[in-house]
Image (cartoon, helix red, strand yellow):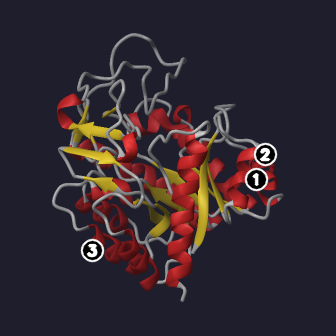
């Protein structure tokens, strides 16, 4: 198993790469690392990212999420989806040629939404600030037409109107179309397409169905296409907040089938309809047990800490991640002996 760190585009720097390596990381997951450009992420740009990571004795294991403007027509089943699909396939091929083994994605029109942090929120351990969720706090109004995906405005979309509602059958039909086109390319390129569970794990958000809001959806996805490239971006934090879930059984199910591309290792307090994202050692999930189950089934991919609470520090993100990475490194080392 390789410990890694996820770095977003606005954070990407020599200092963050040094930070990751100094704390023992072997892998980097780059979150939407490149601009929209011409609709394709090109080989030379991904090679440049990889070289920066390799300079510090780490591997660029995964790119997390296509640029929202690269596939809005695909997810929304709009005119232009065929051209976007061709471009997505080119991006996947380029990633394979560079040697990037995983490409994470979230087949969602809304992305991650619904979390809140009240002013002065200090509900976490030691009065730390944590991300919280309540179903009653959700904005369920239709998204504006330009508001495709997570905190994104796509300027080329008309500013008029709203994204239309989508039911279960239609969203799965769109998902199937995407996979039927993308998976053969990914398999040939040696790239794993890793689907993130819907976060928050609600069946509908703002009128749009969420196909991976429960374990049944995850199971349906991996059974749709029998391909080594059809995998999960196993967000343990999201899965642990699903209703009536036994997170340990879910780990066993997908790890034993070799269907995990890479892991978001995060702890939570509570499940739907209300929960919080807490310190890695402070939730209801026994992280030592969870780590042991991944190892039991021979998982040897990348594991990253995902989100952390905001701590009292001059560099809150760095401090939170350092704590989580130290915890993960300790678990990995202890399980090897």
Give how far apart the Cα atoms at labels 3 and 2 are. Answer: 39 Å
Rendered-image quadrant of the N terminus: bottom right
Q: Residues within 10 Å of mark 3 (few under 14, many from 20)?
A: few
Visible in this render: residue 185? no
- Residue 1 appears in the picture as rendered: yes
Q: Are marks 2 and 1 in contact (CB under 8 Å)?
A: yes
Question: Where residue 35 sits: x, y (%)?
Answer: 66, 33
Location of residue 337 with respect to 83 vertically, above or below: below
Residue shown at the point (22%, 68%) measured from the top left? 246
Residue 66 in the image, given as x and y percentages of width and height: 55, 43
What whole-number distance in Å separates the C-alpha atoms at marks 2 and 1?
6 Å
| Residue 138 spot, x, y in % from top left | 24, 30
Q: Which residue is mark 3?
A: 249
Which of 133/245 is in front? 133
* Residue carrying label 1: 18
Mark 3: secondary structure: helix
- Which quadrant is home to the C terminus? bottom right
Say if 131 sits above or below 17 in the image: above
Which residue matches tag 2?
14
Nearer the observer: mark 3 or 1; the answer is 1
């Amino acid at each position: 198993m390789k410990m890694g760190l996820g770095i977003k585009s606005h954070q990407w720097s020599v200092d963050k790469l040094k930070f990751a390596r100094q704390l023992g990381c072997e892998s980097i997951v780059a979150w939407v690392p490149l601009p929209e450009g011409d609709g394709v992420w090109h080989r030379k740009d991904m090679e440049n990212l990889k070289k920066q990571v390799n300079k510090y004795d780490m591997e660029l294991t995964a790119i997390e999420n296509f640029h929202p403007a690269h596939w809005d027509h695909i997810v929304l089943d709009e005119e232009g989806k065929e051209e976007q699909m061709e471009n997505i396939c080119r991006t996947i091929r380029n990633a394979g040629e560079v040697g990037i083994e995983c490409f994470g994605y979230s087949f969602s029109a809304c992305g991650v939404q619904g979390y809140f942090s009240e002013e002065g929120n200090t509900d976490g351990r030691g009065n730390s600030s944590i991300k919280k969720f309540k179903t009653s706090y959700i904005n369920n109004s239709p998204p504006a037409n330009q508001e495709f995906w997570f905190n994104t405005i796509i300027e080329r979309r008309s500013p008029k109107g709203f994204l239309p509602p989508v039911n279960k059958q239609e969203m799965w039909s769109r998902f199937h179309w995407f996979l039927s086109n993308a998976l053969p390319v990914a398999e040939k390129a040696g790239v794993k397409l890793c689907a993130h569970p819907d976060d928050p794990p609600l069946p509908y958000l703002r009128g749009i169905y969420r196909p991976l809001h429960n374990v049944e959806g995850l199971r349906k996805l991996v059974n749709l296409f029998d391909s080594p490239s059809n995998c999960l971006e196993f967000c343990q934090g999201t899965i642990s907040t699903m209703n009536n879930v036994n997170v340990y059984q879910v780990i066993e199910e997908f790890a034993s089938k070799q269907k995990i591309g890479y892991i978001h290792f995060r702890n939570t307090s509570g499940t739907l309809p209300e929960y919080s994202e807490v310190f890695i050692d402070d939730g209801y999930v026994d992280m030592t047990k969870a780590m042991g189950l991944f190892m039991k089934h021979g998982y040897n991919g990348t594991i990253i800490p995902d989100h952390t609470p905001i701590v009292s520090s001059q560099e809150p993100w760095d401090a939170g991640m350092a704590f989580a990475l130290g915890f993960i490194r300790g678990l990995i080392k202890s399980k090897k002996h």
